[in-house]
């Protein structure tokens, strides 16, 4: 018996490489973005404040994307995720991928 595997091509738009200031605009709500910056501080177990020199934004990081020692202040990271508008009117990023350099 012969089996074949068919791979379907998925045409997902690549994340937009932007600044935090741009992510805070209404134009990027619901869009996937790519942002690089430094961790200012950890706000909660899975939430950090990220700054890139233009502005700061909260980033929700999945637990499996956080290194064992945590994401310490001044750690340079790159995140890919979706910009969401929170109920209190502020934007944040729901990270799908986090890359860091120690």
Image (cartoon, grey):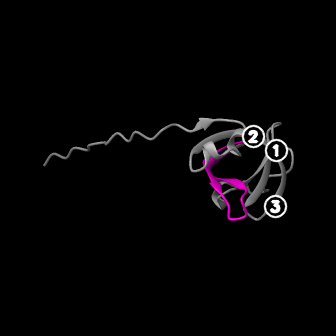
x 75%, y 40%: residue = 21
Q: Helix or strand or loop: what does disc 1 sit on?
A: loop
Q: Nearer the viewer, mark 2 or mark 3?
A: 2
Please state the horizontal and vertical placement of residue 56, each as a whole percent of the image: 80, 46
Q: Nearer the viewer, residue 49 or 55?
A: 55
Q: Which callout, 1 or 2, points to the residue nearer the camera?
A: 2
Look at the numbered disc 2 and give the secondary structure of its residue: helix
Q: Is residue 78 visible?
A: yes
Mark 1 vs mark 3: in front: 3
Q: Is residue 46 above or below residue 8?
A: below
Pointer 2 and pointer 3: residues touching (CB < 8 Å)?
A: no
Numbered range of the magenta stretch: 78-98
Q: Which circle marks residue 21 in the picture?
A: 2
Residue 50: image location, x then y, percent:
78, 47
Residue with the mark numbered 1:
75
Left or right of 99? Residue 3 is left
Prevailing secondary structure of the magenta residues: strand
Residue linked to disc 3:
43
Residue 51 placement, left or right of 3: right
């Amino acid at each position: 018996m012969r089996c074949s595997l068919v791979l379907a091509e998925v045409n997902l738009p690549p994340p937009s490489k932007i600044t935090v200031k741009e992510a805070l605009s209404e134009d990027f709500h619901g869009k996937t973005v790519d942002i690089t910056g430094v961790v200012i501080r950890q706000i909660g177990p899975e939430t950090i404040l990220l700054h890139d020199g233009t502005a700061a934004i909260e980033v929700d990081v999945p637990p499996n994307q956080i290194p064992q020692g945590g994401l310490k202040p001044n750690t340079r990271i790159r995140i890919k995720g979706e910009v969401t508008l929170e109920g209190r009117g502020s934007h944040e990023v729901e990270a799908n991928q986090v890359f860091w350099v120690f």
